Amino acid sequence: MRTKSGFLELSPDQLRWNCCPDLVPVGSSAEARACDEIIGQERALRAIQTGLDIKSLGYNIFITGMVGTGRTTTITQLLDQLEKGEKTPDDILYVNNFKYPDEPVLIMLPAGQGKEFSTSMTTLIDLLKTNVPHLLKSPYYTEKRDAIVESQQKKQRELLQSFEAEVSEQGFSVIQVQMGMFSRPDLIPVIDGQPVPFARLEALVKEKKFPKESLEALREKYEKLTSKLEDIFESLKEIDEETRTLLREWDEESITPVIKGSLDEVRAKFNTPKIDAYLDEVEKALGNSLEAFKAQKKDDREPVEDFLEYRVNLLVDNSDKHGAPVIMETNPNYVNLFGSIESTMTRIGMSQTDFTLIKAGSFLKANGGYLVINALDALVEPGVWAVLKRTLRNQIFEIQNYLQMYLFSSARLKPEPIKADVKVVMIGDATIYNLLYFQDEDFKKIFKIKAEFDSEMERGEQAIGDYVRFIKKICDDDGLLPLDKDGIAALIEYSTRIAGRQKKLSTRFHIIADVIRESSYWARKAKRPAVGREDIEKAIDERFARVSLIEGKIQEMIEEGTILIDTQGAVVGQVNGLSVYDMGQFMFGKPARITARTGMGRGGVINIEREADMSGPTHNKGVLILGGYLRGRYATKRPMSLTASLAFEQSYGGVDGDSASSTEVYAILSSLSGLPLRQDLAVTGSLNQRGDIQPIGGVNEKIEGFFGVCKAKGLTGTQGVIIPHQNVQNLMLRSEIVAAVKDGKFHVYPVKSIDEGIEILTGVEAGAPDAAGEYPDGTVHGLVDRELQRLAKGLKDFSAPGEKGEGPSEGPKK
């Protein structure tokens, strides 16, 4: 509708879309069927399904979208449906590599068989630990062993007896000579039945009590017998070695069949080439380690398990799985995601490890299935992204110790690599996706599917029905009060407000769910049986009241006059702009005074915020566009000599965005024309160089912010806002403002161009150029054009002779 002055003004029904209760298909949410599907994300669902169905290399999925749009819920539901119909992946095991112990051997077995194989090997060793010692104590074993020992000892005795007899015949006796801690056998002459050392015999020779010839003869015999003694001891050693060989052969003959029989039972159960090769190595190793079965541990203080090298490390056990595994890793650090190789400390403080200390992470547990992780979490954790993309690119996974990557571990293993078959789903936002896509060449090769979750959906009969069923689900899950028709209508209206367009509904369901929960709380507190409109509105108001401290402080300063805002009268070069404060949890709008001062010079438009390093790039762009508009409007026939300064008064925290560019133009035009601007109006709108008004964001918050100031200072019936006409579809104003407009106490003016806006603000016709490009006298553009001509003439007259028309610098040159 148009006002008496001919300005287009919005009617109350254009300021808000009201959901008629008749659009709600049920009388209460309790009558609806709870939804069990994803709402409003058909495009994303198709993309995800494509990624899940294609099994080729690189078809991993990256999901983007705002928090609360159902990204995690969607992928969880889809994967739950898939996992039951797909093949259960193999179990993953590591066993000892007897040839190279630092390179454990990988074994893959069908789901469930890994646990059976591990149990079989444990049972095998436990049986051998019991049966072999019993066999060693049996008469069958001991009698043969004793016979072997007795036979060999008899050979030694016979050899020694023969030698001793010969020694005795030659007049010598065998004695033991102490050599420190040890003793050795030696020969000593026997004279008259008594052993006499050679030293004593030499003394007797000197005393001529013993013939020298007899001593020499004894020495010759001694040398021969000593040489023979050495040969005897060599023969005794050979007999000892022969004894050990015979005993070992007997051990193998008696015990090896027990070991082989036990291993054959395992072979029969798990007939695969890799297990056969492993059991062959086990058989060899056990055959060479029979002494371990004989040894009895007397000291239980050492916490080392016997026969550890024959155990099985069941890394991933899928015996209880039915279909492909789905792993949701909420804490994707390196160890949780990729596992580790742990180590233990010996008594002397040395680090040691073995294949039984290899631990699996979420990636291996998801092998043959799906892994879901948060993109930001994976990127910020050290080492995670590099290993993840390398594994997905090469389809080979190698477990390594996390500390080993930083050289903190001396004990190292290199387990046999595992073939990776994991579909990874990363959940993040568009910023992270774009960062990886353009900065990491590997990313686009391994994440070929992008699923974008929308934050809004079309408002229609189907969508409203889906919303009702979503409400039912939340109420059922949390045990909440049902919503009646009016309550459902109020919630749908709030959803439209969040979406930012009257024909849309929000898909940020975490916010909607919170409002449902909180409205149920207020309804219970009021002792109502169901949630109505007043409870929904109460919950929404309370949600913002909890976090609106800063908004309240700014409003208080405006009311006290600390922040200068006029809501009445008219002032030259001054206009109320509308700004939005984004606090993260919520946004609110407040007016800001924007002023312009103009004068002679060639400085152009000076952005004071930019000069003070308080202006963002978008705001700087808006000011430059503003300069382009002024040049296109007034400098096509003559040069424009102007220095104009623009400022957001009392702005101390920085300014960004171009929604004030039209407002700044109004301030400059007012300053140049001398026409005062209405202070009972606030303005927002972006500008292009042709003078067209462009849409902006936060229109509801901006209007509500100025209305709050006007209400606090007193509504006069003339106050209102000027907004871009394209933003009419975004309006979802509070009922209080709609009522004020209906009563004629507040006004909302949509405009398409600068000309429309300046006419509303000044009450003066903007003016259109004639054929010669001149503007009519008394119009806004005519007054501005005359003033610019005056400034140009004044600047020329002021310029000193010889300066070729250059005037003094009145500002930084653009």
Image (tube, helix red, strand yellow):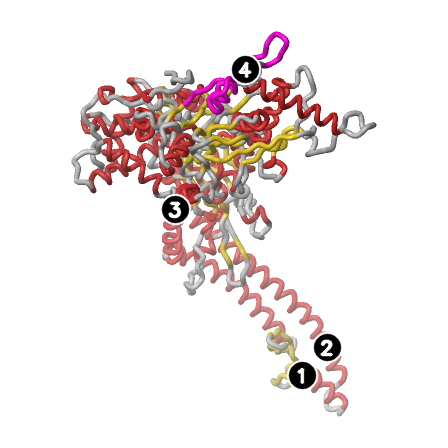
Front-lying residue, 809 or 686 = 809
**Residue assigned mark 3:** 124
Q: Quadrant of residue 66?
A: top left
Q: Position of residue 125 (x, y in %)?
A: 40, 49
For residue 262, say whether it is visible: no
Q: Please tell me how crowded label 2 is: few (under 14), some (14-19), or many (20+) other residues with Cα within 10 Å.
A: some
**Residue assigned mark 4:** 767
- Indicate which disc, 3 or 2, sits on the residue closer to the N terminus: 3
Q: In the image, what residue type sits under mark 4?
A: Gly
Disc 1 + disc 4, Cβ < 8 Å: no
Q: Quadrant of the N terminus?
A: top left
Mark 1 or mark 2: which is in front?
Answer: 1
Secondary element type, mark 4 = loop
**Residue assigned mark 1:** 197
Q: Please tell me how crowded label 1 is: few (under 14), some (14-19), or many (20+) other residues with Cα within 10 Å.
A: few
Image point (38%, 42%), residue name: 548
Q: Position of residue 62 (x, y in %)?
A: 47, 28
Disc number at residue 219? 2
In the image, is 37 to the left or to the right of 599? left
Q: CA distance from mark 2 to mark 4?
A: 147 Å
Tell me: residue 575, above or below residue 140. Answer: above
Q: In the image, what residue type sits under mark 3?
A: Leu
Q: Quadrant of the C terminus?
A: top right
- Indicate which disc, 1 or 4, sits on the residue closer to the N terminus: 1
The magenta segment is 749-775
